[in-house]
Image (spheres, grey):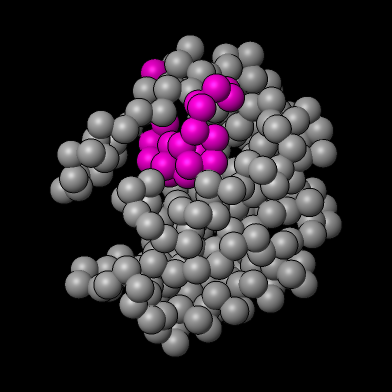
């Protein structure tokens, strides 16, 4: 049985940056069974209702600006899987969710940046599912739960976002800047809630977790966590598999759910 995974994908520069999170991703595949396919719920694909992409080969979407030319030359041409996209659509519809199929969209950097480090050969089929930020945490647990049967088929379900994501404090920060107290407090609360499987508290994190609105002024970068959590089933066991920080305010934590 495949675990489901939450990854913090950080800055688009991560593939070109010497950082603990990059080293972690480079070694990630060795710690997992080899997947038959990978399904990524990325913070960078927001839609009104769930969608899944179905292409022959994924384009690499450079959905950012102002970075060095070397970053725009990177490509991750992983194959798609139209049959699996249809299965995902059926799973979501069976769970009472609508699901459209996008036959054009490739992979945004929330998918290809971590995957090109973990699975550099780009030979495993990769699909993306979208997030619906306006529908909140419980919706994304439900979405993830609909994907749970895929884990028994060798599919790796990944939620790709950011453990903290207050970019208002990003500029001028050194990559090794110390973490502010609010980042530490929020991260500690979320970790404890996950380890103790306090699902109701996690769904209501915006009210209960310290500094939640500061660490996530908007929720799209945390919602992939809830997809991964939902995909782990009714009583998920959460294990933190990485923790580090970039620029002080971007925690790069990752979790495995089994």
Q: Position of residue 251 (x, y in %)?
A: 46, 68
Residue 76 percent coordinates (x, y): 41, 28
In the rendered image, residue 121 lying in the magenta stretch gets the answer yes
Q: Picture coordinates of residue 220 (x, y %)? A: 44, 54
Q: Is residue 175 visible?
A: yes
Question: In the image, is residue 90 above or below residue 151?
Answer: above
User: Residue at horizontal 74%, vertical 45%?
Assistant: 3
Hey, which residue is sitting farthest bottom in the picture?
181
Report the residue at 54% width, 35% height from top: 119
Specify the quadrant that holds the N terminus.
top right
Whether 33 is among the magenta residues is: no
In this rendering, the answer to whether 210 lies above or below 57 is below
Which residue is more in the foreground, 95 or 107? 107
In this view, the residue in front, 13 or 159, is 13
Numbered range of the magenta stretch: 104-125
What residue appears at the point 63 percent right and 14 percent down from the top-left corner?
83
Quarter holding residue 241: bottom right
Which quadrant of the structure image shows residue 98? top right
Residue at the location (53% across, 46% down)?
26
Location of residue 114 with respect to 75 vertically, above or below:
below
Q: Position of residue 92 (x, y in %)?
A: 66, 31
């Amino acid at each position: 049985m495949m675990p489901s995974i939450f990854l913090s994908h950080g800055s688009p520069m991560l593939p070109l940056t010497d950082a603990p999170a990059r080293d972690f991703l480079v070694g990630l595949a060795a710690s997992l069974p080899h997947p038959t396919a990978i399904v990524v719920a990325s913070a960078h694909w927001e839609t009104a209702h769930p969608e899944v992409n179905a292409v022959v080969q994924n384009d690499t979407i450079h959905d950012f600006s102002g970075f060095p030319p070397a970053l725009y030359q990177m490509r991750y041409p992983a194959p798609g899987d139209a049959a699996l996209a249809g299965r995902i659509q059926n799973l979501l519809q069976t769970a009472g969710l609508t699901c459209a199929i996008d036959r054009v969209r490739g992979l945004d950097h929330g998918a290809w940046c971590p995957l090109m480090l973990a699975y550099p050969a780009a030979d495993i089929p990769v699909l993306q599912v979208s997030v619906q930020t306006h529908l909140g945490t419980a919706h994304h647990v439900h979405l993830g739960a609909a994907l749970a049967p895929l884990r028994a088929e060798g599919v790796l379900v990944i939620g790709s976002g950011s453990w903290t994501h207050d970019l208002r404090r990003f500029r001028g920060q050194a990559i090794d800047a110390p973490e502010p107290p609010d980042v530490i407090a929020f991260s500690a609360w979320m970790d404890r809630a996950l380890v103790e499987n306090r699902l109701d508290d996690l769904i209501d994190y915006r009210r209960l977790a310290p500094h939640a609105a500061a660490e996530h002024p908007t929720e799209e970068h945390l919602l992939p966590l809830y997809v991964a959590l939902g995909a782990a089933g009714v009583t998920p066991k959460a294990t933190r598999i990485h923790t580090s920080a970039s620029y002080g305010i971007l925690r790069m934590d990752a979790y495995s759910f089994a």
